[in-house]
Image: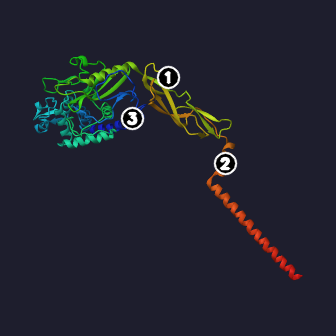
Amino acid sequence: MRYKSIKILSIFLVLIIMAISAVLPGSAVSYSNDVKTQSDSILLVNMDSGQVVFEKDADSKRYPASTTKIMTYIIAVENIDDLENTRIPIKQSVLDVLEGTGSSLANVANHVGKTMSAIDLLYSMMVPSGNDAAVVLADYVGNGNTGNFVKMMNEKAKKLGCENTHFENPDGLHNSNHYTTARDLYKITSYALTLPKFSEISDTCTYYCEDEEYPLITTNYLIDQNRGGDYYYMYAKGVKTGTTNEAGRCLVTTASADGYSYIAVLLHAPYKEGEIEDYGTMTDAADLFRWALTSLELDTVATSSMPVCEEKVNLAWGRKSVQLTPEKNLSAIVPKNYNKDNIITEYDVPESVDAPLEKGTVVGKATIYYKEDGSDTKQVLASVNLVSSEKIERSGILYVFNVIGTVIQSYWFIILIGIIILIVLLYFIISKINNHRGRKKRKVKNYRNF
């Protein structure tokens, strides 16, 4: 029963996320800042509104490394009935696939021949980034076939609207056909954050599995106050790290402060084992969070009481136009103390509309842009319907005249008039011919009488 409930909930959440994605206030805005980033692909999104506030090469395909496990978590949770009480057998044959790969491990091998709870395996996969836990979960959910599990991962990615993502394994080990983008990984993570236990597990720094003497330790220094050192950022939470030579440093994380929340996806920061060991993704994330939390704010960029334009109205007695206003108040994340001239509104409306119009009738659409000082580029902040600001009655007399005029100007009316004219002409010609013949007959008759 719980499994069916989770399946229904997951479908519902997918629909919600896709619907929200379709009406995001702005999907292309990227505010300039002074942060010197090391990651090659970045997406920073306000979690409250879904608005992108900064991006850098967010649609380029990148190797995701262990951030792959966010999708692995999704598939596992949606297909395991009871996370707390489901016992999963630990088989040596499953763990053997990782031999010689240099995988990060969570000591799952200590339980070979026994079982582990699904919840312990999820912690083992997400906290220390255990590839061993990932393959055990994939084998279990895939009914002994990891390929089945990977197929489910790819199907889920498509359902979430990921356009440039393909998985080849559940752990993130390098494969040239295993890739995603910062934007796709944002979609995946946004969905995962709605699932049971995800936030709790991904934000855990230390965890003890059943019958284990030593704890699992997070790989995310950004959230670990005890071990994070200079990388620790007090407002950060979760989500997942990832590292391979080919993928570089990768990170998905969130931060909240002063009523604002942001999610950052950072891929392909410099890394080479034994040579470049810095965590550039964590430095980038913390610096971007500081910038966003101190330099950006939510502000109203359009109000339903402020007219945007006037629209010509037909068929209204004594009224030539009506003012159009935004359908609703519209807010967006913008730089603090921005110049009001930075906000540009452009509208798309027909040349005219016919009365009657009810107040609130949708007539057109307005697009709100942000244009930074000194820039020629307009970035879309939001779009909103434009509606009639008042009720406009239709004049019956003008309507009748309009109908008559429309009929007169119609194609079929012209044809009909042409046919009538042709009939009249034919009638006139025939009448003339008949009259001429009649006169001739009268002349002949008169002649004979004479």
Pointer 3 residue: 21
Label 1 CA crowd tier, 10 Å (few <14, some 14–19, many 20+): few
Name the residue: 66% across, 51% down.
Answer: 408
The label on residue 340 is: 1
Is 343 or 141 nearer to us in this picture? 343
Q: From the image, state whether disc 1 or disc 3 is nearer to you.
A: 1
Marks 3 and 2 sit apart, C-alpha to C-alpha, by 46 Å
| Amino acid at dot 1 | Lys
Which of the two discs, 3 and 2, labels the residue nearer the N terminus?
3
Percent position of residue 35, x then y: 33, 21
Q: In the image, residue 333 lies at what x, y percent?
A: 42, 25
Q: Give the Cα separation between the discs numbered 1 and 2.
A: 46 Å
Secondary structure of the residue carrying numbered label 2 = helix
Q: Nearer the viewer, residue 145 or 366?
A: 366
- Relative to 285, does residue 437 appear above or below in the rendering? below
Residue 156 vertical placement versus 295 (above, below): below
Q: Is residue 424 visible?
A: yes
Give whichever of discs 1 and 3 has the lower sequence position: 3
Measured Cα–Cα span from mark 1 to mark 3: 27 Å
**Which residue, given by chain and number where applicable, does mark 2 sit on?**
405
In the figure, residue 109 lies in which quadrant?
A: top left
Q: Which sits earlier in the primary sequence, circle 1 or circle 2?
A: 1
Judge depth for marks 3 and 2 and give the one in front. 2
The numbered mark at residue 87 is none
Q: Nearer the viewer, residue 70 or 274?
A: 274
Locate residue 312 relative to residue 262 in the image: left or right: right
**How many residues crowd mark 2 within 10 Å: few (<14), some (14–19), many (20+)?**
few
The disc labelled 3 sits on which kind of residue?
Answer: Ser
